[in-house]
């Protein structure tokens, strides 16, 4: 007969960023929780797997045909912020951004078998083809895969009469320059802005 704690630890280890020690702590914490709270967590996972799907427009996670961002008339439907994963949307929403999104489902990475046709790049072009889009903000990560993906998208969309922009990157607020690497400093210099005096 299998040990239920050990079984939970094994399953928690399948989550990203959860090692054995963290899984043990979580398992024993769940064991000490009131039963209803543990049931609520389990039910939330079941409901997510059963009811969640991808938005038919932007590929965000939703329970409806269209996500609450795409179906919101208050959002600027003429601006699309292109992100890698649905989790990126949560971060951008905290900034007060009022446009819409498009989730690629990753980055181009031929080594990992992720070619442009395996991402939602063609669907992005279809949205732009409607003529209702004024700007596409490419918000992929500033790493090799993200840069490759951003360049691919920019090249694909340059034939359309829209503004194509890339999020700025460089030094994070609060960092001492002595701790920044050369690439970060180089990007910070490239993305410099004039100072208003």
Image: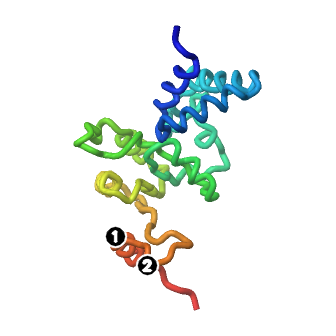
Q: Mark 1 — residue? A: 183
Q: At numbered mark 2, what does the secondary structure look like: helix, strand or loop?
A: helix
Q: What is the residue that sits farthest to the left in this orientation? A: 111
Between 166 and 145, the residue placed more toward the observer is 145
Seen at 49% across and 84% down, the residue is 194
Q: Earlier in the sequence, mark 1 or mark 2?
A: 2
Q: Position of residue 55 (x, y in %)?
A: 53, 34
**Crowdedness of circle 2 by 10 Å Cα count: few (<14), some, many (20+)?**
few
Q: Position of residue 104 (x, y in %)?
A: 41, 42
Left or right: residue 33 versus residue 80 is right
Residue 197: x, y in percent?
58, 92
Can you name the residue that lies furthest to the bottom here? 197
Which one is nearer the viewer's eye here, 128 or 31?
31
| Residue 75 locus on image (x, y percent) | 63, 50
Quadrant assignment, res 32: top right
Residue named by callout 2: 178
Identify the residue at horizontal 41%, vertical 44% (top origin).
Answer: 124
Please determine whether, in this image, residue 33 is positioned above or below residue 75: above
Label 1: few (<14), some or many (≥20) within 10 Å? few
Give above or below for 94 relative to 59.
below
At numbered mark 1, what does the secondary structure look like: helix, strand or loop?
Answer: helix
Please state if 54 lies on the left or on the right of 73 as rendered.
left
Q: Residue 48 or 155: which is nearer the viewer?
A: 48
Mark-to-mark CA distance, 1 and 2: 13 Å
Say the numbered circle drawn on residue 159: none
Callouts 1 and 2 close, C-beta under 8 Å: no
């Amino acid at each position: 007969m299998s040990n239920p704690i050990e079984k939970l630890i094994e399953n928690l280890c399948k989550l990203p960023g959860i090692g054995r020690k963290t899984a043990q702590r979580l398992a024993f914490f769940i064991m000490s929780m009131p039963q209803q709270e543990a049931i609520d967590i389990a039910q939330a996972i079941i409901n997510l797997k059963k009811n969640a799907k991808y938005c038919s427009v932007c590929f965000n996670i939703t329970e409806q045909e269209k996500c609450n961002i795409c179906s919101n008339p208050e959002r600027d439907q003429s601006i699309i912020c292109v992100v890698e994963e649905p989790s990126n949307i949560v971060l951008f929403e905290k900034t007060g951004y009022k446009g819409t999104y498009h989730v690629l489902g990753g980055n181009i990475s031929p080594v990992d078998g992720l070619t442009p046709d395996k991402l939602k790049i063609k669907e992005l072009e279809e949205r732009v083809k409607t003529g209702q889009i004024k700007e596409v903000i490419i918000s992929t990560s500033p790493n090799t895969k993200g840069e490759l993906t951003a360049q691919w998208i920019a090249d694909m969309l340059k034939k359309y009469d829209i503004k194509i922009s890339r999020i700025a990157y460089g030094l994070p607020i609060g960092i001492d320059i002595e701790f920044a690497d050369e690439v970060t400093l180089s990007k910070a210099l490239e993305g410099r802005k004039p100072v208003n005096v």
